[in-house]
Amino acid sequence: MPFVITSPCIADYSCVEACPVNAIGPHPDDREFRAAEQLYIDPAKCIDCEACVEACPVGAIFAAERIPPRWKGAIALNAAYFSERRND
């Protein structure tokens, strides 16, 4: 998993707009966007370009290998978010 969004995320969609491969969700037009407490990066789509890191207004996106220890659980949360959607 190249990049991970952690709990400081405020569900601002700046990173969604910056992502060239549409790897971040939910999207502003998805029904679950309004209720989303944070956004997630699809590990199968992320191309490790770092565009989302620069776009994040609260510094909530990290390379998986550099994620602060207190947010390590975000790795599984990001992967699970998209895994659940693929299984629907």
Image (cartoon, rainbow, N blue to C red):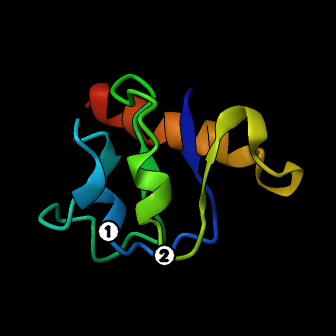
58 over 69 or under it: above or below: below
Residue 14 has which mark? 1
50 left or right of 34 in image: right
37 over 76 or under it: above or below: below
Identify the residue at horizontal 51%, vertical 36% (top origin): 80
**Where is residue 58 shown, x and y percent of the image?**
56, 75
Identify the residue at horizontal 35%, vertical 60% (top origin): 15
In this figure, which residue is indicated by the disc labeled 2?
57
The C terminus appears in which quarter of the rendering?
top left
Residue placed most toward the observer, 28 or 14: 14
| Kind of residue at badge 1 | Ser
Element type at mark 1: helix
**Where is residue 67 shown, x and y percent of the image?**
75, 46
Element type at mark 2: loop
**Where is residue 66 shown, x and y percent of the image?**
76, 40
The alpha-carbon separation of the residues under discs 2 and 1 comes to 8 Å
Can you name the residue that lies furthest to the left here? 29
The N terminus appears in which quarter of the rendering?
top right
The answer to the question of whether label 2 and label 1 lie on touching residues, with beta carbons closer than 8 A, is yes
14 left or right of 39 in image: left
Identify the residue at horizontal 63%, vertical 65% (top origin): 7
50 over 6 or under it: above or below: above
